[in-house]
Every structure is written in structure tokens, then in C-alpha cells.
Image (cartoon, helix red, strand yellow):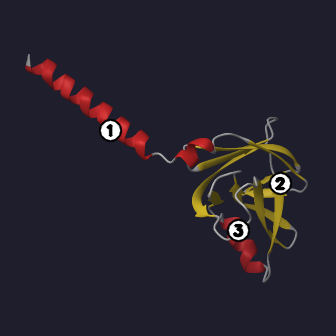
Amino acid sequence: MKYSQSRWAIFIAAVGVVVTLMAGYPAAAQAQTSGLRVNIPFEFHVGDQVLPAGSYMVMLRSGTALTISDGKGQAAVRLTNAVSRAGSRKTGDSLLVFMVYGDRYFLNEVRWDGYQDARSLVKSKTEIEFAKLNSTSTKAVVAAK
């Protein structure tokens, strides 16, 4: 009898943990799992990986992992952090922001239509090195759907 009661207690505790986690999961992160389609007209870096120009699908997985894939074998995954879009372009734009050092483009941020927060990619060692070598940088913005 005690064994059965302890199993129920564990079950109820597990259900409580799941409900608590689901209640605390941000709605924006859930919605951002919908993919963005984007045509990137230049070769670019996602972390230490270089991807060719082309059409890509961008997805946010597990709330922090960004995946970008052309559906033909070119793909990259990078961890992200939430960043506020306050003071930036209106929240109605879906777009990708690239940092440009010389002639190298690094995916820096992804913004989803209608969401206050964007996702900023964690800088890779390669990007940090290019930033050190280039005294100036610019931003390039590519619209997504």
C-alpha cells in the first residue's frame, strides 16, 4: 500500500513540475518556432560555419537554439540570447541582421514579425577575431517572410 501511495506522490509532483514549466515558458519563444524564409544574397558566417548565398529557412528551437537551413544540406545551429527591440525598427518586421567586417558577413540577430524581443547570436571565436582585425564594422539587413 505504501509503495502505491509513493508512486502517486511522484506522479503528482512530476505533473506539477511540467505544469509549472509550461506556464513559465514565454509565448514569444513558442511562436518564434515558426520558420522565416529568407533569400540571403551573400556568403555569410553562422558562428564558425560559412554558408553560401541562397534561400534559407530560419527556426528557433527550444527557445534558444537557432537553426538556419537551405533544405539541401547546408545548415547551421547557434545559441541565442533574447534582446529587446525597443528603439529599433517597428516590431512588424521579420528580418536578419548581419555584422559586416571587411567583406565578411556574420549573422548577428533575427527579428520575428510582431514580437518585442529579437534573438541575438552568441559571437564565435571567428567573429571576435574579425572584429579585432577590422577597426570598423557595418550592419546589413535582409528582410524575411
Q: Which label's residue is closer to the chain start, 2 or 3?
A: 3
Tags 1 and 2 in contact by the CB under 8 Å rule? no
Residue 60 place in picture, x, y as percent: 63, 45
Residue 80 place in picture, x, y as percent: 60, 56
What amino acid type should be assigned to the residue bearing mark 1? Val
Residue 88 marker = 3
Residue 143 marker = 2
Q: Is residue 46 left or right of residue 100?
A: left
Task: Give the farthest residue toward the right.
Answer: 41
Q: Is residue 46 left or right of residue 24?
A: right
Indicate the quadrant containing the C terminus: top left, top right, bottom left or bottom right: top right
How far is disc 2 from disc 3 in space, using C-alphas? 15 Å
What amino acid type should be assigned to the residue bearing mark 3? Ser
Say which element carries label 1: helix
Q: Considering depth in this image, is 143 or 140 the residue closer to the camera?
A: 143
Q: Is residue 69 above or below residue 4?
A: below
Seen at 70% across and 55% down, the residue is 111
